[in-house]
Amino acid sequence: MERKIEKAILDWKNSVRRMPLIIKGARQTGKTYTALMAGKKYYKNTVYFNMEDSQELVSIFEKDFDTDRIIAELSIRSGETIFKNETLIIFDEIQASERALLSLKYFCEKAPEYHIIAAGSLLGVALNREKYSFPVGKVNMINMYPMDFEEFLWALGRRDLADMIREHYLSNEMFSLHDTAMKYYRTYLLVGGMPRVVLDYIETNDYNFVTASQKSLNDSYIADMAKYATANETTKIMNAYNSIPAQLSKENRKFQYRVIKSGARAYEYETPIEWLNASGVINKCVKVKDGKMPLSIFVENESFKIYMADTGILCSKFSIPPKMILTETNTFDNFKGALTENYIASALRTIGYDLYYWEANGKAEVDFVIQSSEGEVIPVEVKAADNVRAKSLGVFMKKYSIEKALRISSKNFGFENNIKSVPLYAAFAIDE
């Protein structure tokens, strides 16, 4: 399955300022598969090392940071010659070896002719927990997320539809295949973007297999929680994680500690929530008190919302029957609103936007506020259906003299009163 990150890897390969590359992301988002595919497409050969597999492998980095020696021993262990500028070296689960991680600094400084990609599903957690010596300024870093809706369409062989959606996003013209695109969108909500789950859907077209695969992935997340946490911390992480559906089911989706359990306090759960954020299984959306640029200086860190990184995993945690997602029904309207917001949060995060929302004394609230690469502040309103009447967007635009806004809903493309109407299925095109 083709991933957009492949282009970033190719750009990295060809960069004159290339440093060892670290790919961060949640478990099973496709980091290793994508790196291996890049090796197959762009390199003479690839050598792969999983740092969790062998203590002998880890010990190669224990003696010193002599890059010539390390390359020679890695070559012997892999049974393949490692060529300068022609071999891709992959270190998987690099967080299992602090010394291997630190060695990237020396490869950057002394042996930049070796192309190295390191990946780790719990790398952010390990770094926070173990206080590793991180090679600051000596590595390139990219984040990998679940497949977005455009990649999902590619996997289903509907690149033509994805291209048409992008064209209509730019032109604002009504899309004649709107209903068809909405059907694929609802399927994506249910399946999500985890590659293994998407593959199960493609091969079986059976939502029982999809759900089973999602639950297995969810179980692996829970198993991961014990790797870098004490038993007490693991319990708190699981409690915070399991509260997310209930948090999103509220009309006010602001994260509330009392939803985790009665009497819960912020100081008890700040670390567990940061664990979930660092592991890549959630997206955190923080409140801003002002819609001015730069948004980052107006954050109120004590007020935030939490979304799952993948809509499919969220659906499986809700245990909602597939037909409730796939059909036009008013049943579970509040749930659909939460799921839709979750989808947009993932889409915006995948594009590269930091997630913020705005709220004014309980009288008005804008679901998301993003800052473009040009420095524009853009409010984003999200609606699960085509009922788009809401005053908050207008309040925000007037208060901060905003000239451009996005309203994402089940309505077709359009533009009116400086508000661009974007169908839910076109969220991936907001990067244009």
Image: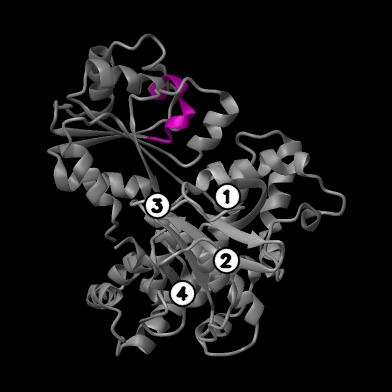
Indicate the quadrant where residue 113 lies.
Answer: top left
**Foreground mark, 4 or 2?**
2
Q: CA distance from mark 1 to mark 4?
A: 31 Å
Q: Secondary structure at mark 2?
A: strand
> How far apart are the two marked residues, 3 and 2, measured between alpha carbons?
19 Å
Dot 2 corresponds to which residue? 366
The residue lying at 41 percent from left, 84 percent from top is 183
* Element on which disc 1 rests: helix
The mark nearer the N terminus, 4 or 3, is 3
- Label 4 element class: strand
Nearer to us: label 1 or label 4: 4
Asked if one can make out residue 105 in the rendered structure from this viewpoint, the answer is yes
Which amino acid type is shown beneath numbered disc 4? Ile
Q: Amino acid at mark 1?
A: Tyr
Mark linked to residue 221: 1
Q: Quadrant of the N terminus?
A: bottom left
